[in-house]
Image (tube, grey):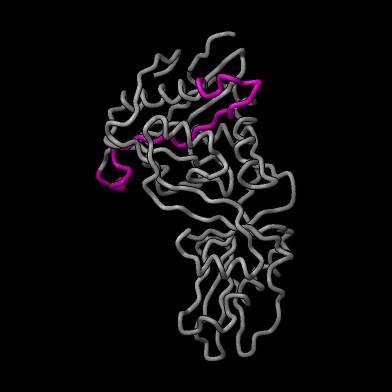
């Protein structure tokens, strides 16, 4: 069997890389895939990362190839050391995402390919001489961030290399729009629709004008360059209820307002995000029609003295 080779990404890898990316996306969120153009754009810049994106000073994409097939790939980011860069990111290196084939009879040496690629990633981080090393799974698709529990093969690669989960865990929930509460009048409460920070905002007002709460829904998850294999997808960017009016049905009423609007938009599914420790919020969403889609672990760090290797990379930096 031909030897594995780790090298820099070439443009003619684009179709195989996109297929590998979409296989990982499909394991996290149903009915979503991304185009070749989306993947290529992500290698150059992260348009949605308007805060951390400009802090990136260098990007490197590596692939592991065997028998002419791309069997693993990784995208690395180096952040600058300027004072205006956030402290956590300043002079840091990150594996932005890492995808590989899971062990299978057709790819019996998939673990070897993944480990070889990871060795090359660590070698690149070593050459950058960064202050800290992080890893994530931020593929250019909606709902895919952190390290989803649906990728145990990627998690194993990270752990074998010395990365450890040091951040929070979030629960991602999903609901069919038609399964959310039905919109009915709530005595003394009116809704105002405006532009919010994270999408379209619906604000609940009491008769005296007091704000009881608001919800924001983003219907722009599937941008024009992305392809979804089924109906539209939206997410809840913000949901806040005035504690003084908690328990009065305002939250369900706002969810109904959002659902009514999303049905008009042709959106079939809605996603929400909650901290795994916030069982109260998770319980409210599940009672309103949501169910757990997956859990994702954010912030992986390469701890000193764990893992590490040097590997020759053909045509790499």
Identify whether 103 is placed above or below 217. above
Q: What main secondary structure does the magenta stretch of the protein show?
A: loop
Quadrant of the rendered structure where residue 277 is? bottom left
Magenta segment: 83-112
- 43 within the magenta span: no
Q: Where is residue 227 in the image (x, y as percent from the top left)?
A: 69, 42
Residue for point 61% across, 83% down: 190
User: In the displayed structure, does residue 57 sit left or right of residue 140?
Assistant: left
**Along the line of sight, which residue is nearer the eye, 112 or 83?**
112
- 105 within the magenta span: yes
**Along the line of sight, which residue is nearer the eye, 265 or 119?**
119
| Quarter of the figure with the N terminus | top right
Q: Position of residue 291 (x, y in %)?
A: 63, 60
Quadrant of the rendered structure where residue 27 is? top right
Residue for point 31% across, 23% down: 127
Identify whether 286 is placed above or below 66. below
Q: Look at the image and tell me whether residue 225 can be seen.
A: no
Q: Look at the image and tell me whether residue 269 can be seen.
A: yes
User: In the displayed structure, does residue 286 sit left or right of residue 56?
Assistant: right
Q: How many labels does the image show?
A: 0
| Quarter of the figure with the C terminus | top left
Quadrant of the rendered structure where residue 252 is? bottom right
Q: Where is residue 178 in the image (x, y as percent from the top left)?
A: 74, 65
Residue for point 59% across, 20% down: 108
């Amino acid at each position: 069997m031909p030897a594995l080779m780790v090298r820099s990404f070439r443009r003619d890898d684009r179709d195989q890389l996109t297929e590998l990316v979409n296989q990982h996306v499909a394991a996290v969120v149903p009915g979503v895939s991304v185009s070749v153009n989306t993947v290529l754009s992500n290698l150059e810049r992260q348009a949605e990362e308007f805060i951390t994106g400009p802090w990136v000073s260098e990007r490197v994409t590596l692939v592991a190839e065997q028998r002419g097939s791309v069997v693993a790939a990784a995208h690395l980011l180096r952040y600058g050391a300027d004072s205006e860069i956030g402290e956590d990111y300043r002079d840091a290196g990150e594996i932005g995402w890492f995808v590989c084939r899971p062990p299978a009879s057709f790819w019996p040496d998939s673990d070897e390919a993944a480990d070889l690629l990871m060795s090359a990633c660590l070698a690149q981080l070593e050459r950058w001489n960064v202050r800290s090393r992080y890893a994530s799974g931020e593929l250019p698709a909606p709902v895919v961030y952190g390290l989803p529990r649906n990728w145990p093969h990627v998690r194993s690669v990270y752990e074998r290399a010395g990365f450890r989960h040091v951040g929070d865990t979030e629960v991602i929930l999903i609901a069919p729009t038609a399964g959310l509460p039905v919109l009915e009048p709530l005595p003394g409460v009116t809704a105002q629709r405006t532009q919010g920070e994270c999408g379209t905002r619906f604000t609940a007002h009491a008769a005296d004008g007091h704000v009881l709460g608001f919800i924001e829904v983003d219907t722009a998850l599937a941008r024009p360059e992305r392809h979804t294999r089924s109906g539209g997808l939206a997410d809840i960017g913000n949901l806040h209820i005035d504690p003084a009016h908690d328990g009065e049905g305002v939250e369900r009423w706002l969810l109904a307002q959002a659902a009514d609007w999303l049905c008009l938009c042709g959106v079939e599914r809605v996603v929400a995000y909650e901290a795994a420790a916030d069982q109260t919020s998770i319980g409210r969403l599940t009672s309103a029609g949501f169910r757990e889609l997956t859990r994702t672990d954010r912030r992986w760090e390469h701890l000193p003295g764990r893992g590490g290797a040097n590997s020759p990379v053909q045509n790499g930096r």
